[in-house]
Amino acid sequence: MMPLYAVICKDKEGALPIRQENRPAHLDYINETGIVMLGGPLMEDGKMCGSLVILEAPDLDAAKAWAAGDPYGKAGLFESVSVTEWKKVIG
């Protein structure tokens, strides 16, 4: 099994329209790349405010490249993106 990486993205203020417009391309990218193990929106007060994606990738550079290629990021949805190795312990 390859290492796991957490991609944690925080949306820009008022970015919901960008998220909605680019969702189909984002989901296609996930399916095409085949390295996403888990993923979904971060929530705050019942509203989407970011994304958490767990990747299975050969190394940190590959995980960062995946994040850089995500249509959400390319569309300017995010205020910040961090990619860090993650170790699954439970679940």
Image (cartoon, grey):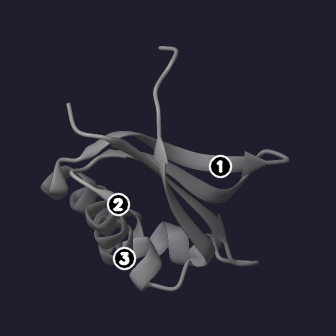
**Residue placed most toward the observer, 61 or 55:** 61
The dot on residue 42 is: 1
**Residue placed most toward the observer, 90 or 12:** 90
Depth-wise, is mark 1 or mark 2 nearer the camera? 2
Instruction: Name the amino acid type tagged 2.
Output: Leu
Q: Earlier in the sequence, mark 3 or mark 2?
A: 2
As drawn, 8 above or below 53? below
**Residue placed most toward the observer, 24 or 90:** 90
Label 3: state its secondary structure. Answer: helix
Picture coordinates of residue 52, whole percent (x, y): 54, 49
Picture coordinates of residue 22, whole percent (x, y): 40, 72
User: Residue visible at 73% across and 78% down?
Assistant: 14
Whether tag 3 and tag 2 are in contact, CB under 8 A, the answer is: no
Depth-wise, is mark 3 or mark 2 nearer the camera? 2
Whether tag 1 and tag 3 are in contact, CB under 8 A, the answer is: no
Depth-wise, is mark 1 or mark 3 nearer the camera? 3
Label 1: state its secondary structure. Answer: strand
**Residue placed most toward the observer, 81 or 22:** 81
| Position of the N terminus by quadrant | top left
Q: Earlier in the sequence, mark 1 or mark 3?
A: 1
Q: Earlier in the sequence, mark 1 or mark 2?
A: 1
The answer to whether 9 appears left or right of 36 in the picture is right
The answer to whether 48 appears left or right of 65 in the picture is right
Q: Which residue is mark 2?
A: 60
Q: Label 2 neighbourhood size at 10 Å, few (<14), some (14-19), many (20+)?
A: some
Picture coordinates of residue 39, whole percent (x, y): 44, 43
Label 2: state its secondary structure. Answer: helix
As drawn, 1 above or below 75? above
Alpha carbons under labels 1 and 2: distance apart = 22 Å
Whether tag 1 and tag 2 are in contact, CB under 8 A, the answer is: no
Alpha carbons under labels 1 and 3: distance apart = 19 Å
Q: Which residue is mark 3?
A: 68
